[in-house]
Image: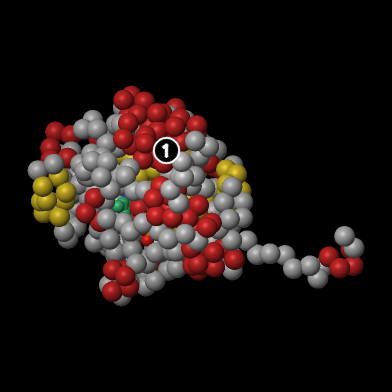
Amino acid sequence: MSKVHSHHDRVASPDLFTPVQIGALSLPHRVVMAPLTRNRSNPDNSPNDLNVEYYCQRADAAMIISEATQVSPQGVGYPLTPGIHSEPQVAGWRSVVDAVHDAGGRMLLQLWHVGRISHPSLQPNSEQPVAPSAIRPEGEAITYEGIKPFQTPRALELDEIPGIVEQYRQGAENAKRAGFDGVELHNANGYLLDQFLRDGTNKRTDAYGGSLENRARLSFEVLEAILSVWPADRVGIRISPSGVFNDMSDSDPRRTFGYFVEQLNRYDLAYLHVVEPDQADRDAGVTLVPSRELRSIFNNAIIPCGDYDRDSGNLAIANGHADAVAYGKKFLANPDLPRRFMLNAPLNEQDRATFYGGTEVGYTDYPFLESAQESAQEPAEVA
Ligand SMILES: Cc1cc2nc3c(=O)[nH]c(=O)nc-3n(C[C@H](O)[C@H](O)[C@H](O)COP(=O)(O)O)c2cc1C
């Protein structure tokens, strides 16, 4: 091709189907599966064969982010959610990851400690849940005995903080042993690290409260512990700067998350995963911090999530606001979501009644395009 004309050639802008490198991970396209709690693990919080089937069905994702996974018994906040702190849990996850890999996929584990979003009945020795400060969240805990009002958590003692960091480090190490391709630190949605970061839930007067630097300290200590186990190009982090879920608030979200994301650049992580405002956030009138605003601050890949469809996902990538896009509810209901997007095929509707807990119904029985189309469109074989 003539050099003279090359600068006139139209370079097609990337879209959901353009391959991309996210840290160490080479993704064949950009349709990421968002982390989705499904409450279908074993009573000992280990993944089971049904969980293997569910994730394996979704192995065509650019990458799968696992459902949030407890780093310790203290980190548990809901019934039948998986953990990564016991050998049966590591073995269960190993089966999941092996199946996803055999199917050609990539999978990261989301590391989770719920902090105050728990209940004594879910805690070892029926202890009070822990938090940065003794502030009770509005709302109700979901327990094995049904829904119960949240109780006031116990503020973590200063000398307990290294133990919290160690829980995450151990979880990261166990995730590596289970064969994951990386880990995502759950710093979003009102769980422990988000409770430290935002000033509505953090009233501490020690090195972990008060200034922005202090409120962000635990997240960065945890990140450094994770990075003692994993290379940075296999570690991501999830934040929800606009989120009010789990009774969260901050006096200045733009400043808090602007600082936090700027500081994240020190770690050269694979990606920043941003939960975008949903209708509840908008209704609550919080300061909205869309991921495209963080684009100018963060140096590496950004993955937004929240109410994206095929067109808005393509647009976010084409205009440079996103490097990949994560899909939650649509991936839950469409195991072959990337293929459906590629073909611009219709999507299955999600059934909210089966989101959290239950059987294979609403979990592994959402139809693939082939079976849906074959039954609807293919002419019967003529014998
Ligand atoms: C059933 C369900 C479970 C979820 N579990 C998690 C989770 O474990 N970790 C997390 O960070 N977000 C979780 N989320 C939030 C989703 O990852 C995502 O941010 C949200 O659903 C918005 O994206 P969507 O509109 O594409 O579904 C969950 C959402 C749903 C609907």
* Left or right: residue 266 compared with residue 331: right
Task: Report the colour scheme.
Answer: secondary structure
Residue at the location (35% across, 52% down)?
333
Residue 270 location (% of width, % of height): 54, 48
Label 1, on which residue? 56
Q: Secondary structure at mark 1?
A: helix
Residue at the location (27% across, 72% down)?
284
Residue 252 location (% of width, % of height): 37, 69
Residue at the location (59% across, 68% down)?
319
Looking at the image, in which quadrant does ligand 1 appear?
bottom left
* Left or right: residue 3 compared with residue 26: right
Q: Quadrant for the N terminus, please.
A: bottom right
Q: Residue furthest front?
A: 383
Q: Closest to the observer: 255 or 33?
A: 33
* Left or right: residue 349 compared with residue 238: left
Q: Is residue 383 above or below residue 256?
A: above
Identify the amino acid type marked 1: Cys
Q: Closest to the observer: 326 or 337?
A: 337
Q: In which quarter of the view is residue 233 placed? A: top right
Residue 316 location (% of width, % of height): 53, 66
Residue 51 location (% of width, % of height): 33, 37
Q: Closest to the observer: 189 or 81?
A: 81
Is residue 210 visible in the rendered image? The answer is: no
